[in-house]
């Protein structure tokens, strides 16, 4: 573990971590009921009262790291920002690569109308340049990575 992860493990606020879990549940419920029905269901959406759950859960989920960053004291440890960002990128990229690989395999076994992609699309998704080339996103959900 590098210094920042050691500090974060020691100072995790369990209430904030519970809030993170609630945010994830809001996002999952939104996608399972509202978004799925919006894409594949009828024109009448039964769960319209859930339409803001996904964006609310996402906002909460993205604000939690800001809370930890604000409460983080750089003077207490030796810290290399470049090293930390490199480790974070590798860890997140690996999970992203696994997620889109599983998604690509599943949609080739169980085709989804208007959600199909090729293995070339998958390869371009791994490099994050697909959003700039107009190549479709393998899972349709990681479009925000092209904006960062």
Image: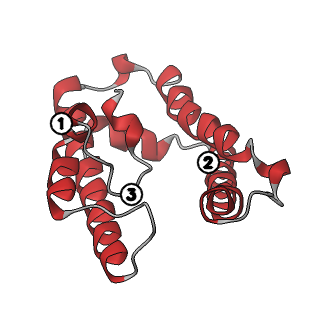
Q: Earlier in the sequence, mark 2 or mark 3?
A: 2
Q: Is residue 135 above or below residue 84?
A: below
Residue at the spot 66% in from the left edge and 46% down from the top edge: 54
Q: Residue 32 location, x and y as percent?
A: 64, 65
Residue at the spot 44% in from the left edge and 40% down from the top edge: 8
The residue at which mark 1 appears reads as: 86
Crowding around mark 3 (Cα neighbors within 10 Å: few <14, some 14 to 19, many 20+) is some
Q: On the picture, is 34 further left or further right than 84?
A: right
User: Of discs 3 and 1, which sits in the foreground?
Assistant: 3
Q: Is residue 104 above or below residue 128?
A: below
| Residue lying at the far front of the rendered structure | 43
Instruction: Verify CB contact (< 8 Å) between mark 2 and mark 1.
Output: no
- SS for dot 1: helix
- SS for dot 2: helix
Quarter of the image for the C terminus: give it.
Answer: top left
Q: Which mark is residue 20?
A: 2
Crowding around mark 1 (Cα neighbors within 10 Å: few <14, some 14 to 19, many 20+) is few
Q: Can the viewer see residue 32?
A: yes
Give the CA separation, mark 3 to mark 1. 25 Å
Crowding around mark 2 (Cα neighbors within 10 Å: few <14, some 14 to 19, many 20+) is many
The residue at which mark 3 appears reads as: 139
Q: Residue 135 location, x and y as percent?
A: 25, 44
């Amino acid at each position: 573990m590098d210094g920042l992860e050691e500090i974060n493990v020691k100072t995790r606020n369990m209430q904030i971590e519970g809030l993170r879990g609630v945010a994830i549940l809001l996002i999952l419920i939104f996608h399972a009921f509202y978004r799925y029905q919006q894409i594949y269901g009828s024109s009448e959406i039964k769960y319209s009262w859930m339409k803001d759950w996904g964006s609310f859960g996402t906002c909460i989920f993205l604000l939690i790291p800001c809370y930890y960053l604000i409460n983080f004291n750089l003077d207490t440890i030796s810290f290399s920002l470049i090293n930390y960002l490199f480790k974070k990128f590798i860890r997140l990229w690996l999970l992203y690569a696994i997620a889109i690989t599983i998604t690509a395999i599943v949609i080739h076994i169980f085709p989804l109308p208007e959600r199909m992609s090729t293995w070339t699309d998958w390869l371009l998704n791994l490099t994050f340049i697909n959003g700039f080339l107009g190549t479709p996103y393998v899972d349709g959900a990681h479009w925000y990575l092209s904006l960062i």
